[in-house]
């Protein structure tokens, strides 16, 4: 090898070594493209039929849980809980039905969390043996995709006739359910769960609001957020998103300005969707908080199971407020492995 060739080889090796960290890091993240105007489909070509549920990352996959409505009006006993999984929020695999051998009834709003102490995945859900005789059920599984076996189909909580709910696992391992009481004018409250998440301690926050549905509870930077708004059962116009915050999971909660991030100056919903969940997704720039809402009666083919679901990244102010929502058709998120 001539001196000139040798020098060129040394330069090339030096350049490659300097780029190696970038190559390694490139494999640690990827960009996902999110569309709010086209139907999400599974790897078999079917439209994702998973509504009024939640999205979580367990291990190296994302799991979307929801109610499958198919061609029904949503008020019958044909509703089923369904799970899809994805490595990148774009390619979705249909995992199948979640709940094993459910009794006949009308089912809504499945929410799953992982209990690190028991190493079980826990599903809480709202169902009605007859409309509107509300009950909360709980089921468990060894795997995030299920099947989930019913532990208790009628969990005792402190408020009567429970309806819509949300589920939250805190960083200290404690679990909480936020839910409505149909019998008390759809009053929203929060309740602490047992250590295994299979029951309620009935330690309750007290009423946060009335005539409300679709509650969500999450925490960011030490602040607890309770989000909900007026009843909007399968409504096409969508609902608002009121913001209440507290320093403790059971409160007391106070309104946070702007009090409603999904209503304009005239009180009209900005995003014509009803809230279902706020997903916490790790990204290259930190944790992202993804608001999810169902756009009822939105699909051109009029099939309820094909209704679109709107996903939006929440933006926060320095004092913990949330910036009002904007209509965004398509956006990107850089995910970490």
Image (cartoon, grey):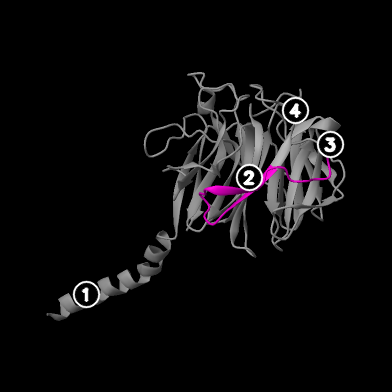
Disc 1 versus disc 4: nearer the observer? 4
Mark 3 surroundings: few (<14), some (14-19) or many (≥20) residues within 10 A: some
Q: Is residue 219 left or right of residue 24?
A: right
Which stretch did the figure color magenta?
A: 137-159
Does label 4 or label 2 sit earlier along the sequence? 2
Q: Which mark is residue 231?
A: 4
Query: Was residue 147 drawn as part of the magenta stretch in this picture?
Result: yes
Dot 4 and dot 2 residues touching (CB under 8 Å): no
Disc 2 versus disc 3: nearer the observer? 2
Mark 2 surroundings: few (<14), some (14-19) or many (≥20) residues within 10 A: many
Front in this rendered view, residue 268 or 265 = 268
Does label 1 or label 4 sit earlier along the sequence? 1
**Percent of width and height locating residue 265:** 76, 26
Front in this rendered view, residue 136 or 61 = 136
**Distance from label 2 to label 3 (Cα)?**
21 Å
**Percent of width and height locating residue 133:** 75, 31
Disc 4 versus disc 2: nearer the observer? 2
User: Which residue is denoted by mark 2 in the rendering?
Assistant: 111
Q: Is residue 148 left or right of residue 171?
A: left
| Image quadrant where residue 263 sits | top right
**Distance from label 1 to label 3 (Cα)?**
71 Å
Q: Is residue 203 left or right of residue 299?
A: right
User: Which residue is denoted by mark 1 in the rendering?
Assistant: 9
**Distance from label 2 to label 1 (Cα)?**
58 Å
Mark 1 surroundings: few (<14), some (14-19) or many (≥20) residues within 10 A: few
Disc 1 versus disc 3: nearer the observer? 3
Q: Which mark is residue 209?
A: 3
């Amino acid at each position: 090898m001539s001196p000139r060739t040798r020098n060129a080889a040394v330069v090339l090796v030096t350049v490659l070594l300097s780029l190696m960290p970038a190559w390694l890091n490139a494999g640690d993240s990827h960009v996902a493209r999110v569309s709010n105007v086209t139907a999400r489909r599974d790897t078999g070509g079917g439209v994702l039929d998973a509504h009024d549920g939640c999205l979580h990352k367990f291990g190296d996959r994302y799991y979307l849980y929801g109610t499958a409505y198919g061609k029904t009006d949503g008020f019958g006993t044909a509703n089923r809980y369904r799970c899809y999984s994805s490595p990148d929020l774009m390619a979705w695999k249909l995992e199948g039905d979640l709940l094993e051998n459910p009794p006949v009834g009308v089912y809504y709003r499945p929410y799953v969390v992982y209990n690190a102490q028991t190493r079980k995945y826990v599903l809480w859900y709202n169902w009605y043996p007859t409309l509107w005789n509300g009950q909360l059920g709980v089921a468990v599984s060894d795997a995030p995709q299920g099947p989930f076996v019913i532990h208790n189909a009628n969990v005792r909580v402190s408020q009567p006739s429970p309806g819509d709910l949300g589920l939250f696992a805190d960083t200290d391992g404690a679990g909480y359910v936020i839910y409505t009481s149909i019998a008390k004018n759809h009053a929203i409250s929060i309740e602490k769960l047992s250590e295994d998440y299979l029951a309620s301690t009935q330690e309750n926050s007290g009423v946060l609001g009335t005539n409300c549905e679709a509650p969500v509870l999450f925490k960011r930077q030490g602040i607890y957020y309770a989000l909900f708004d007026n009843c909007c059962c399968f409504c096409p116009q969508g609902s608002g998103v009121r913001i209440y915050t507290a320093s403790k999971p059971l409160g007391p909660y106070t309104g946070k300005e702007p009090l409603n991030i999904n209503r304009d100056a005239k009180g009209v919903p900005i995003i014509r969707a009803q809230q279902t969940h706020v997903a916490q997704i790790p990204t290259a720039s930190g944790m992202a908080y993804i608001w999810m809402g169902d756009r009822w009666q939105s699909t051109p083919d009029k099939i309820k199971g094909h209704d679109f679901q709107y996903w939006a990244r929440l933006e926060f102010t320095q004092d913990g407020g949330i910036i009002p929502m904007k209509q965004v058709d398509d956006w990107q998120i850089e995910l970490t492995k």
